[in-house]
Amino acid sequence: MACSAICLNPDWAANASHKYEDNVAEEGGLKKRLIAFGLGILVLGGLFGLGLLSSGDIRVIYIAGAVALLGGAVWLGASGRPDWIAAGLLVLPVFAVFGFLVLAQIPALWFVLLFWAIAVTIGLFVVKAVHARALDGVAVVIALTALLACSLWCCISYFPKLLADRLNHFTRESAPSFALQPVSGGSAPTAWKPGKILVMDFFATWCVPCKAELPELQAAYSDLNDKSDIQFVLIGSDVGGDTPERVRTFAKKQSITVPLAFDPGCKVRGKFGTLGLPSIIVIDRTGRVRLVRQGYNPAETTFRRDFVRFLETL
């Protein structure tokens, strides 16, 4: 029966062979896409871990993401013609979480996703370019060089300026009356005094960005220590279980010499409308709030310099 079918249709065997090859190719493509998605989840996990270790340094997250996604795309491109669906599944976990957690707060970082997409596109064609004409290889090298140059510019120049613009809010509003609870004795300012500039930094001992910011604040305090008209105070609160004693012990372990105070129930911080940690409030000599700063990122490499210069101009 089979012999008669083959005799009646000489192309039957060839068609069956092509169909089998198509099925195998389809299964292989599905497997590759599933692996690409799994690889994307691994990249996301790695970036999350690096973010915790670097206190959320956007430079570390961006560079690590670009390298990891580029490597994943090179693997995808090495296994055959570029599979754009697999590439999309590779970046999907990272893009989704980055958009939800980071872009929701700093929309101006959208170009990070663009650069990551460019890295993936380049990676898809790296292996093909190596085995193809020299012109294709030159094009890939040029694209990689351009991406590297843009990345260096972002990390050195653009990220610090962008974060400063996002975190610093300059005002001239009158400061509300308040009173803090001293923690480090009589040296800690507990309220604003006429003729004095008061720098208040609200923090928590368990707050990762707060811990990353403290060395910079301590350095600024040391830079201006000879100016008696500029006062600093580091303020803890009972949010998260902190106590005056815990704040005092933490500051001692971290070699922080900035005067300490406590804000029970966050009543003082609430008067300034600041919700996030860390938060810096600067009140000038006339009792006006000149700076409200919420958050910190290590990528803002000019923070100390710019902060000291700002205080010196008041």
Image (tube, helix red, strand yellow):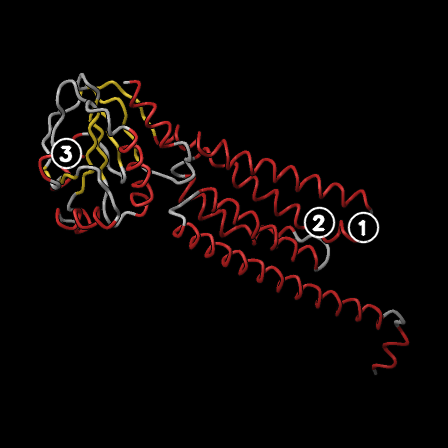
Image position of 21 with respect to 59: above or below: below
Q: CA distance from mark 1 to mark 3?
A: 66 Å
Residue type pointed to by label 2: Phe
Q: Quadrant of residue 201?
A: top left
In the image shown, does 93 or 57 lie closer to the viewer? 57
Residue 286: horizontal and vertical position, in percent? 18, 16
Tag 2 and tag 1, C-beta contact below 8 Å: no
Q: Quadrant of the C terminus?
A: top left
Q: CA distance from mark 2 to mark 1?
A: 10 Å
Q: Which mark is residue 132?
A: 1
Q: Is residue 38 left or right of residue 282?
A: right
The residue at which mark 3 appears reads as: 268
Q: Is residue 64 left or right of residue 53?
A: right
Residue type pointed to by label 3: Val
Secondary structure at numbered mark 1: loop
Q: Quadrant of the N terminus?
A: bottom right
Residue 76: horizontal and vertical position, in percent? 65, 56
The residue at which mark 2 appears reads as: 125
Mark nearer the N terminus (2 vs 1): 2
In the image shown, does 54 or 231 lie closer to the viewer? 231
Secondary structure at numbered mark 2: helix
Q: Is residue 276 left or right of residue 145?
A: left
